[in-house]
Image: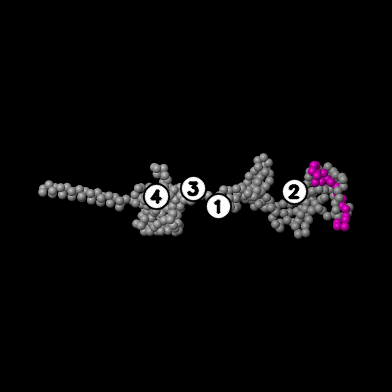
Amino acid sequence: MINLEKDVKTYSLYLIAIVAIVAVVGIVVMTTNYDGFGGTTSEDVLTSDEGEASESVGLAGQAYSIAGCTDPDASSSAVTISQFLNPSTVTNNKGIKPDKCVTEKSGITYLYEAICLYSGTSSYLKKNCAALNSQGKVYQCKDGACVDIDAKPTCTPGLLTETGKCWKDSMWNSIYYQQEYQNGDCTTSLKNTSFCGYNNDALCNNVGCCKDELVPNTAICQGNVLYNQTKNSCTGELKDNYIDCLKQASGWAPKTCKINSVGAPYCGTVDCKSGDITYTCTNNGMGGNYNYYKAICETFSWGGQWKLISEFFPTCPEGATCYNPDGNCAGPKTT
């Protein structure tokens, strides 16, 4: 009888010890930082079987909240396929948990999908992205989401930006401008090639060929001088131009500033009357050396017309307007 009492006391001590161990473990579990964001431990990863995820896509982006925990790509407590396909970050009063890819010792990279629990805490649901493979789609974990690595990128073809590119043909020193376009496969190509000129990189920048374009309504005649204003299409720089039409002879007929039928100034042939004589510094439009050419005006029913006399002078003849201090005909002047 005495031995039985001793045995009962021994068993009681064992039971007390077991209860104490269970209590300590419970306290440890209760005090463990289940939302510890310094790393992922075995306690805060839920193993997923393939039936845990709802097959419905859900409304990704309509945040699901419970007890202070918010999951921005969930729409309910059920984990949906769309959550695996979209990276997000779960938040609660303990901090944050981002979706992430973790390569384990097995060599398999799993998606750790952050989710909210009913308690308001958060955890990770481990998912092998290969389980989503279907109908030619092959998924791998990348940047916190299951990504179809065989998916063909799609883009809207068209002008990518207003900014283009300049390039030079080094063989000919030619300068070109091209616009950059996006293709349907998200690659880019250069189109709409424009020729800008030769030998000067300043002829082009990333907005196009740099041309001096006439500013509307600025051209006027000031005697024989044609005045206009141009604007550089790239820099916006304005430039005043004064062109002496008398020095712009192309061929042997003299020029002056005139107004055309729509009221625009231009350098046109000087009107003349019968017997007028002029000397023009030109190469007669034939290339080669410039000389002073003599012309006489003949009158017809429609008006006077200059007629070239087969006579030219290498230096300034009497009655001519000379453009060179030495009297030499050195070609038309623009200033």
At label 2, the amino acid type is: Thr
Where is residue 154 shown, x and y percent of the image?
54, 52
Q: Position of residue 324 (x, y in %)?
A: 79, 44
Compare marks 3 and 2 and give the one earlier in the sequence: 3
Location of mark 3 (residue): 149
For label 3, the SS is loop
**Label 3 Cα crowd, 10 Å radius (few <14 / some 14-19 / many 20+):** few
Q: Which residue is mark 1?
A: 155
Give the number of the mark in front: 3 or 2: 3
Q: Earlier in the sequence, mark 2 or mark 1?
A: 1
User: In 3D space, how far apart are the residues under numbered discs 2 and 1 (Cα atoms)?
Assistant: 53 Å
The structure residue drawn at horizontal position 75% and vertical position 57%, both measured from the top left corner, is 264
The residue carrying pointer 1 sits among few (fewer than 14), some (14 to 19) or many (20 or more) residues within 10 Å by Cα, namely few
In this view, the mark in front (1 or 3): 3
Image x and y of residue 263, in percent: 76, 59
The foreground one among 39 and 206 is 39
The x and y percentages for residue 235 are 64, 50
Identify which residue is drawn at 40% across, 51% down: 50
Label 3, label 4: how many angstroms apart (C-alpha)? 20 Å
Q: Check if mark 4's residue and mark 1's residue have beta carbons within 8 Å.
A: no
Give me the disc on residue 126: 4
Which mark sits nearer the N-terminus, 1 or 3? 3
| Residue 206 as seen in the image, left or right of residue 308 | left
Q: Which residue is mark 2?
A: 335
Amino acid type at circle 1 is Cys
